[in-house]
Image (cartoon, rainbow, N blue to C red):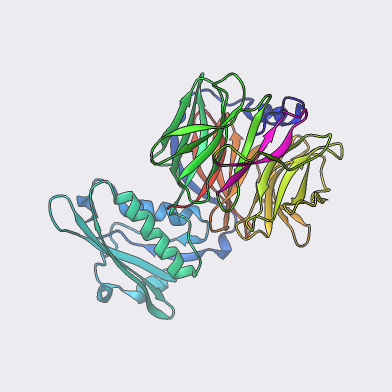
Amino acid sequence: MTVSASGFWPRLFALLFTVGLAANPARADLSVEVIGGGSNRYPLAVLGLQSEGTLPESITATVKSDLAMTGAFNLLDTAAGDAVVAAPGQLDAASWRQRGARAVVYGKIGRLNDATVRLTFWADTLEPRAQKLSAEFDVAPGQLRDVAHRMADMVYEALLGEKSLFASRIAFVTQSGKEYRLQIADVDGRRAQTVLRSVQPIMSPAWSPDGTRLAYVSFEQQKPVIYLQDLVSGQRRVLANFSGSNSAPRFSPDGRRLAVVLTSSGNSQIYLINTDGKGLQRFSYSDAIDTEPAFSPDGRQIVFVSDRSGSPQLYAQALDGSRNVKRLTFQGNYNVSPAFSPDGRQVAYVRRDGGRFKVMLLDLASGDSRLISNSAFDESPSFSPNGKMVLYASAEGGQSVLYAASATAPGRVKLGTLNGQVQSPAWGPFNP
């Protein structure tokens, strides 16, 4: 959330969100739970791989968790007594049809040498009977989860005919006591890696379009300063350290510049800056607080939050220099945190409604909004790279929870519960 030196409402939302969260060490406890939307899910059986017990971790379990988190599949129960299927000719299609499966995923593990195994798997539809997918991977140590994510991607795309999302990562900020950590992880919250550790707050992580860099705000210089960090080399540098507050970085679609919020001119205003820290250019001009910019995917406009109408609302302004501003939200007196869908047709945002903070989805063509979250304090929505889901953080029962809601149909998925305080989740692009 943006910190503004001249206005208190961005701070207010951040404060309300953190009230009641325990300051325990953050720990991801994966518990994929699909809530709603069950009638539209694709019935699928994912069978255990033959000889999978020889592996240090289960590929099948990761594949199932991945597919479950999309909310698009109804994963049928499989029993220990189910026959192992290690080749297409062994699949009892009639039996699985009777159990309600529309498709079955199966395969085997073969050992090539002491370190490397070969994963072979298939995905067959049952009505009509057809082999939709056949693939083989030679897997070295340390690659099991990567291959499992790739397998889930291939199954998703083969059966649904849409681009998948598991070849991506998420970023988020955790707080444990006085320590803050900026972390990146798999889409299911596993394999979290710490990018930055600090005793001062870290906020607003933003991915570069190619997934190799993160921009974020750190208070380590006793004020909000924007940094840019290379995730491959680990090197980082100051992007914006002007007088006053420097906050809310967002990359342009081409990755060449960022929109940032500065208070160097007084109230929070939006500026554009090149990734080398040069070429600073003012974008918004108002006497109000203008903050939380988000580029449209085509790079032609920026949606942002402003209280120029008396309360925080979403506005759009073109990048053609015309300074023409269009108000987007009219319902509710508090609408913040915009995030564009990858196709540019929708904007996710947070609305305060009766003291509760909800994630909404705005259709830009019709102007209609619909609710996609259902907790008391939901924040920081961001779209999956395929546009099918919206990630956000929530506070429930003194814990931080990560949710992913469907952007196309009713239903949401609880990805995991984390002890402690977790803020600012951001879904990254497809992995480079």
In magenta stretch: residue 274:
yes
Q: Could you say which quadrant of the image residue 156 lies in?
A: bottom left
Which quarter of the image is occupied by the N terminus? top right
Q: Is residue 122 above or below residue 270?
A: below
Magenta stretch: give its range: 256-275
Residue at the extreme right: 309
Q: Report x, y in % for residue 90.
A: 25, 73
The answer to whether residue 77 of the structure is visible from this angle is no
- Residue drawn at 72 percent across, 52 percent down: 319
Image-based side of 407 in relation to 44, left or right: right
Residue 83 in the image, given as x and y percentages of width and height: 26, 65
Which residue is more in the foreground, 248 or 130?
Answer: 248
Q: Is residue 401 left or right of residue 280?
A: left
Residue at position x 76%, y 26% in the image: 8
Q: Residue at x 83, y 48 (%)?
A: 330
Q: Is residue 332 above or below residue 180?
A: below
Front in this rendered view, residue 412 or 206? 206
Asked if residue 198 is among those painted magenta in the image, a careful observer would answer: no
The residue drawn where x is 38% and y is 71% is 96
Report if residue 374 is visible in the image. Answer: yes
